Image (tube, rainbow, N blue to C red):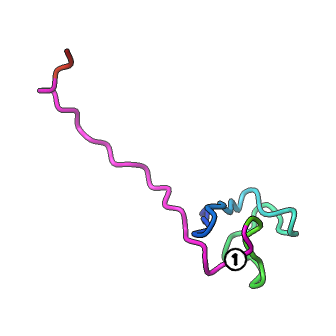
Amino acid sequence: MDKWICTVCNYVYDPKKGDPAHNVNPGTEFEDLPEDWVCPLCGVGKDMFEKVDETPEADFEEDESFEED
């Protein structure tokens, strides 16, 4: 389940939690929200949300030549 973030106020819609205050049950995917659903914090529509990229950072190799003092 993908999380979505409001580009105006940074509210994060988490489908695992839903939005019970606005009759959206837990487990409701962002795409399945009613068309008239708005951000509970700032009131903008779904078109102002972006999918949260939760891809883990790539591992990097340690530079063994680096020495701490």
Task: Tell me which residue sits at (87%, 63%) in the image.
Answer: 21
Q: Quadrant of residue 65?
A: top left
Q: In which quarter of the image is residue 31?
A: bottom right
Residue at the farthest bottom position:
35
| For residue 9, side relative to residue 36 (left or right) | left
Residue at the farthest top position:
69
Between 10 and 63, the residue placed more toward the observer is 10
Check the picture and name the quadrant holding the C terminus. top left
Residue bearing mark 1? 44
Task: Tell me which residue sits at (54%, 62%) in the image.
Answer: 52
Between 42 and 36, the residue placed more toward the observer is 42
Residue 13 placement (x, y as % from top left): 68, 63
| For residue 49, side relative to residue 57 (left or right) | right
Residue 64 placement (x, y as % from top left): 15, 27
| Secondary structure mostly taken by the magenta-highlighted segment of the chain | loop
Q: Residues within 10 Å of mark 1 (few under 14, many from 20)?
A: some
Residue 24 placement (x, y as % from top left): 83, 68
Q: Is residue 28 magenta?
A: no
Check the picture and name the quadrant holding the N terminus. bottom right
Three-letter code, disc 1: Val
Q: Does the magenta stretch include residue 50?
A: yes
**Above or below, 45 relative to 26:** below
| For residue 39, side relative to residue 62 (left or right) | right
**What segment carries the magenta color?**
42-66
Task: Tell me which residue sits at (23%, 37%) in the image.
Answer: 61
Task: Tell me which residue sits at (72%, 77%) in the image.
Answer: 32
Residue 15 placement (x, y as % from top left): 70, 62
